[in-house]
Amino acid sequence: MQSILTYVIIFLLTTSTALCQQIIEGEVVDKETGKPIPFASIGIVGTSKGTSSNLDGKFSLASSEVVTIRVTSIGYESLETTSSSARKIQLKSLPTQLNAVVVFSNEINPKKVVRRAFANIGDNYDSQPFLQKFFYRHYCMDDFVYGRLIEAFADVWKPKGYRSIQKGVGNNEEIRVTQLRRSLDNTVMAQGHEPMSVGYVLQSDIVGYQTPEKSVHVSFYEAMSNLKTDLDSYYFSFNGITNYDGQDVFEITYEYKKDSAQTTSGYLKLTDITGSLYIAMDTYTFLKTEETKIFGTSTVKTSSYYRKYDNKYYPYHFIREGKNQTVGNNTHSFHVELMSVEIKKGEREKFIGKPLVKEELLKILYDPIFWSSNSILKTTPLEDDIIKDLGGGTSLSNQFDRYHQYEINTTNGGKDGEQKFNWLKDYSKDKKILFITYLSDKCADYLNELESIKRLNKLYRNNITFVILSTELNEATWLQTTTKYNLFSDGIINYRIGENSGLVKSFQISEIPAYILIAKNGTVDLNAKHPTDRMLEDDFKFLIKTPSK
């Protein structure tokens, strides 16, 4: 009884604290032009809490009281104001002094400036243990249609701080996701997507991560910077002096010494890399970095921003976005970002993270109270487009609930298989076609059919859900069989229903394998063609074009 009472008290205290939080909304603009200032730092003075403006200069910040906020951005005068007056913050621009008109006693060597900035990381960034709380947003689109949205809060524990540059995420830090909301993944790359890409965007931090060894040719797909490791492989240019938070800043650009690699079939085009660095003149601190990598038709752009807290610098915003061509000549685009909301110091904040896999993430339930009372990166007009593209007008909160139900009912099909399939059948009505295959434990007798199912799934998975129903009684045997023959390939859904399942009788299954086709309107074809029958694709195309109602 006491434990229940304690739980209720904790719940009420947590809820009341959340409800006391107010969301301050405002925008940061150029005082002269009125144009938005993207990715400006908005921090609560005297704390490590803060937020960032979005691409349109807008921001949201959670606070339980009126506070003083400090707004900073490269190339602008900093400004302090109260949160109650933050509806429209105007920053005065400070023009960049071009290198042609800046007079120095000694000529500026940009390469030496960059080298010294890397050497000063231990002095400028926190080398003690700390925890950083981030807001995470990730969305994807195919051509011009949004197909995926993920938002989360993630903690990153750095036991050594920035004491040494890491050779990859997971070597010396822990990551855990504390809050999560997401839509279904309707992109053409759905089956190849990682559940989350926290580590990928975290490696945008050139202060914290660099490739471990010198490279002959830089891979386009390498997530970490090689700038420090391969410093001699870049050209550097000093562009001039700008300003950040009252200090003069070097503006330096760089370019990879691109060359062609000779192969047995000729010359191989290599990756193009260009970027910009903003480095404080007095302390040689990285304040902002930007990089663009291009390989053929594929592009990745990376940005990192840093702000000062308690005499040390910490990242406050990472952005990674890109595009590439997919099978069928479509363009797949992605955008991933992390925005710092708070920093906590000391060993007492230590935790052991959990793998960012589907099974663990499904345990995190959508909490609308939390999301309505905490700082998140303010959305741009893309939110309306995402609602339209992903849910046909369904609200994002309903989409998040739908995702969770879908994943629960399409995962771990060895348990409650019949119940989960019935849910999927009802869910798919008016949305997607179902192609159902009944299998026994004698899969080896019809491997050609199974391989054809995998082929068809790759071609039609955006319109048709491929489901395999197994009559196997033993769960361990079922799992062994599905794994052996890779029946989970590219998102094919597997359920173990047993030979006495009502689904065997209701679909009039007399022999196995058997194939059933259910149209979007619910019409059932009990004698669908075999996967190896080329005429089956004609049936697919007809049903795809047929309206569901």
Image: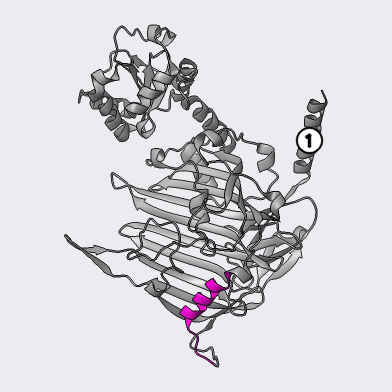
Taking 64 as reference, is 156 left or right? left
Say whether residue 548 is visible.
no
The boundaries of the magenta stretch are 106-121
Q: Quadrant of residue 480?
A: top left
Residue behind mark 1: 10
Residue type pointed to by label 1: Ile
Q: Position of residue 536 (x, y in %)?
A: 24, 23
Image coordinates for residue 251, horizontal then vertical, percent = 52, 77
Q: Is residue 172 above or below residue 384?
A: below
Q: Quadrant of the C terminus?
A: top left
Q: Nearer the viewer, residue 531 or 519?
A: 531
Q: Is residue 519 visible?
A: yes
Name the image colouring: one colour
User: Would residue 263 appear left or right of 118 to someone viewing this image?
Assistant: left
Q: Residue at x 56, y 63 (%)?
A: 164
Q: Position of residue 89 (x, y in %)?
A: 68, 65
Q: Position of residue 409 (x, y in %)?
A: 50, 25
Left or right: where 258 falls relative to 208:
left
Count of residue discs: 1
Residue 269: quarter of image:
bottom left
